Image (tube, rainbow, N blue to C red):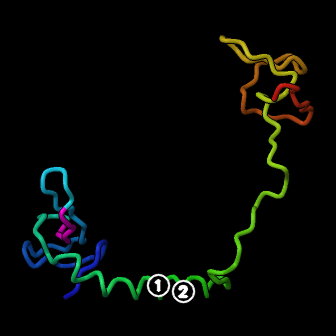
């Protein structure tokens, strides 16, 4: 049987329904390899190198099915969701914002504000 990380199995050692997890094998501070083990009893199931060859093909097939479902291909360029110039109208960048150690204040509306608030009367500060 070929085990894969995250797969639900019945452990041959403890007999419980469990998931397969990857366990790093260390020699001091040096990584020697990775093994697959039961997440409940921590007993080794099978070395990862034996299962690695069978994992690669389904992963790429799954990715291709997902891309087909979306109607896209890997070659298509990603588009930006934001089409503006990237500036935001936050109070911290407004000329009416008064930053004080004990409270932040809007001089236009005469009220306490937060730096990440925004309003329609935004006027960009000259130094930012």
Q: Is residue 88 left or right of residue 120?
A: left
- Density class for disc 2 (Cα within 10 Å; few <14, some 14-19, many ≥20) is some
- In the image, 111 versus 125, the foreground residue is 125
**Which residue corresponds to the image point at 17% horizontal and 76% vertical from the top-left?**
47
Which x, y percent locates residue 117?
76, 32
- In the image, 7 versus 44, the foreground residue is 44
What's the magenta region? 32-38
- In the image, 49 versus 44, the foreground residue is 49
Quadrant that contains the C terminus:
top right
Q: Is residue 57 above or below residue 30?
A: below
Asked if the stretch drawn in magenta spans residue 99, the answer is no
Which x, y percent locates residue 124?
88, 31
Residue furthest left as drawn: 13
- In the image, 67 versus 33, the foreground residue is 33
Q: Is residue 112 above or below residue 60?
A: above
Quadrant that contains the N terminus:
bottom left
Q: Which residue is mark 2?
A: 64
Residue 2 picture quarter: bottom left
**Which residue corresponds to the image point at 87% horizontal and 23% vertical from the top-left?**
95
Give the SS element for disc 1.
helix
**Which residue corresponds to the image point at 25% horizontal and 71% vertical from the top-left?**
19
Asked if the stretch drawn in magenta spans residue 35, the answer is yes
- Density class for disc 1 (Cα within 10 Å; few <14, some 14-19, many ≥20) is few
The reply to whether discs 1 and 2 touch (Cβ–Cβ < 8 Å) is: yes
**Which residue corresponds to the image point at 11% horizontal and 64% vertical from the top-left?**
41
Main SS of residues in magenta: strand
Residue 53 picture quarter: bottom left
The CA span between labels 1 and 2 is 6 Å
Which x, y percent locates residue 102?
66, 11
Q: Which residue is mark 1?
A: 60
Give the SS element for disc 2.
helix
């Amino acid at each position: 049987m070929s085990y894969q990380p995250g797969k639900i199995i019945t452990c041959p050692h403890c007999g419980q329904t469990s998931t397969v997890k990857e366990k790093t094998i260390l020699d001091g501070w040096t990584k020697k390899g990775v093994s697959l083990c039961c997440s409940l009893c921590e007993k080794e199931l099978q070395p990862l190198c034996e299962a690695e060859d069978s994992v690669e093909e389904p992963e790429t097939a799954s990715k291709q099915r997902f891309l087909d479902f979306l109607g896209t291909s890997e070659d298509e360029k990603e588009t930006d969701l934001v089409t503006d110039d990237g500036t935001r109208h936050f109070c911290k960048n407004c000329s009416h914002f008064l930053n004080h150690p004990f409270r932040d204040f809007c001089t236009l509306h005469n009220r306490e504000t937060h730096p990440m608030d925004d309003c329609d009367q935004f006027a960009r500060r000259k130094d930012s």
